[in-house]
Amino acid sequence: MGSIQPAQFELGIVDTIVQEKTVAHPLDSRLLKVSRMALVKAAKGVGIALKQTFAREGKAGGYACARPHKRLRKVVKRQRTMVGRLLRENDRKLPGLSQAAQDKLKDLMARWWGRYSLCQQSS
C-alpha cells in the first residue's frame, strides 16, 4: 500500500509501562464457597428441599492473607464437609426427580465431585 516507508522500521518506540491487574486466585476456600452456592441453587432449581444450606457458615474471612494457617485449615476442612454433605443429600434425593432434572443435577455434581461420574458409571 505504500503507507509505511522501509526507513521507518529502523526506529521503534516501545511503551513498557505495565499496570498490574486485580486477579482473584482460585483459593480452596473461595472455590468451596462457590461450589456450595452452586449446589444449593441447582437443588432449589430442580425442586429438592434441602435440610440445611450452610448459608451462614461459608466464610473463610481473611485467614489466607493474614497467615493464621491453623484457622484457615480448620475453616477449609469445614467447608469441604459442607460441600460433601450437600453432594450426598442431593445424591440421595435424585431418584425422586424427573430424568431431565436428574441429568442437570448429575452434570453439576460431576463437576464439583469428580468421583460422582465414576461411581454412577460402575453401578
Image (spheres, rainbow, N blue to C red):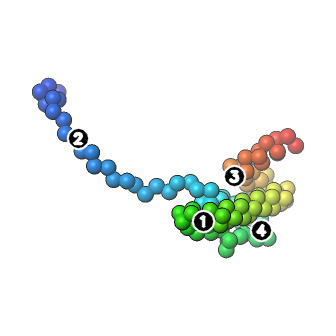
| Residue topped by disc 3 | 112
Residue 49, image x, y percentages? 78, 69
Question: Does residue 80 appear left or right of residue 97 in this picture?
Answer: left
Q: Earlier in the sequence, mark 1 or mark 2?
A: 2
Q: Earlier in the sequence, mark 1 or mark 4?
A: 4
Q: Disc 3 to disc 1, how far (Cα)? A: 27 Å
Residue sitting at x 69%, y 64%: 74
Tell me the element at label 2: loop
Tell me the element at label 1: loop
Residue type pointed to by label 3: Trp
Does any portion of residue 75 appear in the rendered image? yes
Q: Nearer the viewer, mark 3 or mark 1?
A: 1
Tell me the element at label 4: loop
Q: Quadrant of residue 118?
A: top right
Q: Earlier in the sequence, mark 3 or mark 1?
A: 1
Q: Earlier in the sequence, mark 2 or mark 4?
A: 2
Would you call the spot at circle 3 few (<14 residues within 10 Å), some (14-19), or many (20 or more)?
many
Determine which of the numbered discs, if any, sits on residue 50 in the image.
4
| Residue topped by disc 1 | 68
Determine which of the numbered discs, if any, sits on residue 36 in the image.
none
Q: Disc 1 to disc 2, how far (Cα)? A: 44 Å
| Residue topped by disc 2 | 14
